Image (cartoon, rainbow, N blue to C red):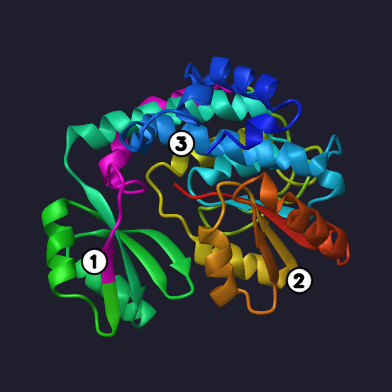
Amino acid sequence: MLSDWLELPGTEQRLAAASEASNLDLVAHGTTSDADTIRDTAVAQPLIVTTSLLALRALLDGRPAADVVDVTAGHSVGELSAAAVAGALSDDGAAGLVARRARAMATAAAAAPSGMSAVVGGDPDEVLAAIEAAGLWPANVNGAGQTVAAGALDKLAELSANPPTRARVIPLQVAGAFHTPFMDAARAEFEPVALGWDATDPTLPFLADLDGTAYTGGTHGHGTGADVLTNLARQVTAPVRWDLIMTGLAERGVTGLLELAPGGVLTGLAKRGLKGVETVAVKSPADLDAARALIAAHSNVLPSGTNATGADQ
């Protein structure tokens, strides 16, 4: 995951700083750790956010994000990456904060068996009704025909055995039912940490997972650091409304969407939910040239042009 990035100038120093901030050996986890090790939520989340921000800095090449990016958002853990894109968190601050989020969520997940399943297809209202009827929660309402149900494993099995009409239920390899009441203990642990974290006012438009709306107010008109931290804490138990994020991007006239590493999921949703928007997913340094071309073609072309999004976990 990180081997190719380590060949870029400055990456080793950035990873050393992120490792210190997160209290994890991110170089080892991103190069030699096995799949079971990095699947651990406490490792996966800091690794994802750090990789996203390595891609961001390589693309910006020293430029302020606000000079290139017109609006940003992040799916689930990717919202911490987006907070760094927006200038609310430093890269090291994002690495440190996500590590604390990840540890709290891993502990909560271990306390009671739970999981998540993607429900693909079907009528959106019928899907939501079926999830509720099964005693589950819609943890991610992703749009483009995809909703993620979360909750107890036996109830997920029941949903899989009796899926909504014209829908498939696909179990996901995750540690627990994130963005549901199963994470109440994680929010209780993480919230005071988040609210006391060092943050500054965002310097560019930033859409929140909670409802898809942009932060407002603050020094630059894009919200305050305190607002961002409050929402990051709430997001641990609240559903991710990526459907509303995509609606917000469309309303802003976004023409190009750039998904930061490790990319792929969000551009897939955009191809179905944001027709006509050009997308590039940065999965490795080999994708940087295509990403730079997207930036050159779309950034600041319209009042809102390019969206830099953080990856999901």
264 on left or right of 216 = left
For residue 245, which quarter of the picture?
A: bottom right
Give the residue number, with chain letter if any, for mark 3: 45
Q: Secondary structure at mark 1?
A: helix
Give the residue number, with chain letter if any, for mark 2: 253
24 on left or right of 306 = left
Q: Looking at the image, tell me whether mark 3 or mark 2 is earlier in sequence order.
A: 3
Residues at badges 3 and 2 in contact (C-beta under 8 Å)?
no
Position of residue 41 measured from the top left corner of the image (x, y, whole percent): 36, 35
The answer for how far apart the CA atoms under marks 1 and 2 are is 34 Å
What kind of residue is marked 2?
Gly
For residue 303, which quarter of the picture?
A: bottom right
| Residue mark closest to the camera, 3 vs 1 | 3
Q: Is residue 231 above or below residue 283?
A: above
Residue span colored magenta: 169-197
Position of residue 295 measured from the top left corner of the image (x, y, whole percent): 81, 57
Q: Secondary structure at mark 2?
A: loop
Give the residue number, with chain letter if any, for mark 1: 132
Question: Residue 119: which numbered mark, if any?
Answer: none
Q: Is 255 inside the magenta-drawn segment? A: no
| Residue mark closest to the camera, 3 vs 2 | 3
Q: Nearer the viewer, residue 300 or 265?
A: 265
Q: Is residue 84 above or below residue 166?
A: above
Q: Looking at the image, tell me whether mark 3 or mark 1 is earlier in sequence order.
A: 3
36 on left or right of 159 = right
What kind of residue is marked 3?
Gln
